[in-house]
Image (cartoon, helix red, strand yellow):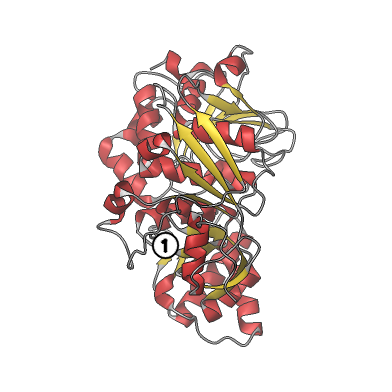
Amino acid sequence: MTPASNGGLTLAEKVLARSAGLERVVPGQIIEGAVDLAMMHEQGAQTVAPFAQMGATRVWDPERVVIAIDHWVPASTEGAAVLHRILRKFAAEKGLPHFYDVGNHGICHQILAENGWVVPGDLAVGTDSHTNMLGAMGAVAAGIGPTEMAAVLALGKIWLKVPPTIQIRARGHLGPGVTAKDLILRVLGEVRTTGATYKSVEFTGSTIDGLSMPERFTMCNMTTEMGAKCGMVGPDDKTFEYLEKIAKHPMHPLSADADATYETQVDIDVDGMPPMVACPYSPDNVRPLPDVAREHVKIDQAFLGSCTNARIEDIREGAALMRGERVHAGVRFIVSPASTSIYQQCLREGLIEVFTNAGAVFTNSSCSACFGGNMGILAPEEVCASSSNRNFPGRMGAKEARIYLMSPAAVVATAIRGEITDPRELQ
């Protein structure tokens, strides 16, 4: 039965209708969507057993499956090594050619983004909650659990409930030293961590139009912290130019209807907005960074990395501030690029040397310190300035540690001063 018409469709509704072969869908409707791209990282090892238990013997389309090892690279524990072995064996047995193993690795979302695995109009799923990031391509990209992924691998389809959509309309110009990370923190402060639970968040407006693709990735990435099923930016010339030489399969660009029905619309004016910071212990505990800087919050560690902000643009921005400076005495500064290709670009541009000469540690590409399970783990009562996406208790180690989320530039400025610092003071 075709849902009753109540006006136009949002971008998420357009994409999900396409995936289900329907003319239109409405929020709350259950659809069976054809999956365009399935991604697994280490958690994907948990799909292998249920895949076999349901009697599946082959993957529906090996060309539409990507596996990327990213959390523990190289394996730092026996448990991680076992997960890696399970995935390698599964890929070999099922003939899955797109395996990004140690040496050609990176954070799974960045691997998908820089290699054109997700394109406009796609329905993409992954075994990581920040799969939302790929919605910057004009796709519905969502995290799912390992059992769901097992069914996707076998059938190429997934049941989904069509989410209602929150529209974020941002206008104005980001000032010097103010970035997309500051904007998404501002949005989080308004929508809150539960404000978009199982909803689509659609970004639009002149500010979004002016953002680069990496900046749009940052925006969509942190819709996960709002509880969103997906975060999306409508495709435009920037999207098509970004994908022109790398798209792995045909695009199906869609856009929201002018008369689309949104559950909520949030207006953000960025003119005059300062850098922002999310204070412990929640990504929505957002304050203007200059206010926090006046409190002289000392740090023990700084982290420039994660799927939110470890692209070449972020590292260049940080290096520009770091040249001629030193990491403050008593501060540990970890820089982790999001992919091997970004690492190689940093090597070519001399950025690694800039950071290591200043006293920072420049690591191989991985999730690194972000999730508190591999390197850069915090001790009780330690304080970290981080460009990542979460600062809940225990996120980067001890539950008593405190994490402040901010832009790459703010992280670097803070590493130099040894206390939370407005990056505009050093620019």
Foreground pick, 322 / 143: 143
Residue 341, position as x, y percentages in the image: 34, 50
In the image, 144: left or right of 179? right
In the image, 161: left or right of 409? right
In the image, 337: left or right of 162? left
Foreground pick, 109 / 373: 109
Tell me what residue is drawn at x 57 percent, y 37 percent.
Answer: 266
Residue 158, position as x, y percentages in the image: 58, 72
Would residue 348 be seen by someone viewing this image from the given angle?
Answer: yes
Would residue 185 be seen by someone viewing this image from the given angle?
Answer: no
In the image, 58: left or right of 250? right
Amino acid bearing label 1 = Gly
Tell me what residue is drawn at x 54 percent, y 62 percent.
Answer: 126
In this view, the residue farthest toward the right is 400
Could you say whether the residue bearing mark 1 is in a helix, strand or loop?
loop
Foreground pick, 225 / 298: 225
The residue tagged 1 is: 121
Residue 71, position as x, y percentages in the image: 54, 53
Quarter of the image for the C terminus: give it: top left
